[in-house]
Amino acid sequence: METVLNTCGDGYWSNVAKAVRITDIQLGYCNEERDFGELLVYFNTEDWDVEKDGLIYTDSAFLDDLRDFLITHELSDDVEYSEQGMQGDNYVSLDVSEAFIKAWDAKFNLFA
């Protein structure tokens, strides 16, 4: 799976606006109650270098594009950026809700 999401440069940690190739999306964590989790959106580091470009964290266009992508793939768009310290050098960390986890499970049969 590869798609492109765009930044607009309005984040707290970056003013860079450009296209970023997404290489993978994973549900990295889910609590036992299945009402909270972490979504990891991995990006191509040739497109986005956190040392040079900063963190994608809080960029509004990236989040909007991601939500559109999730809806297009019959998943919930109930995602929000997690805290700054959760962001990685090659991924964006987002908090997901029970609705998202249920949709993810329905699509990928995670808890079978």
Image: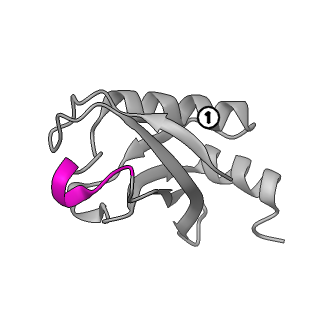
Q: Find residue 32 and report its horizontal and vertical position in percent.
A: 58, 72
Which stretch did the figure color magenta? 47-53
Residue under the point 29% across and 31% down: 17
Is residue 32 or residue 30 the one in the foreground? 30
Residue under the point 40% across and 35% down: 62
How packed is label 1: few (under 14 Cα within 10 Å), some, or many (20 or more)? some
Whether 30 is drawn above or below 20: the answer is: below
Q: Give the amino acid at mark 1.
A: Phe
Number of callouts: 1
Q: Find residue 110 and report its horizontal and vertical position in percent.
A: 75, 67
**According to the image, label 1 marks what residue?**
69
Q: In this view, does 59 lie to the left or right of 19?
A: left
Whether 81 is drawn above or below 78: the answer is: below
Quadrant in the picture for residue 93 = bottom left
Quadrant containing the C terminus is bottom right
Whether 31 is drawn above or below 20: the answer is: below
Quadrant in the picture for residue 58 = top left
Quadrant in the picture for residue 61 = top left
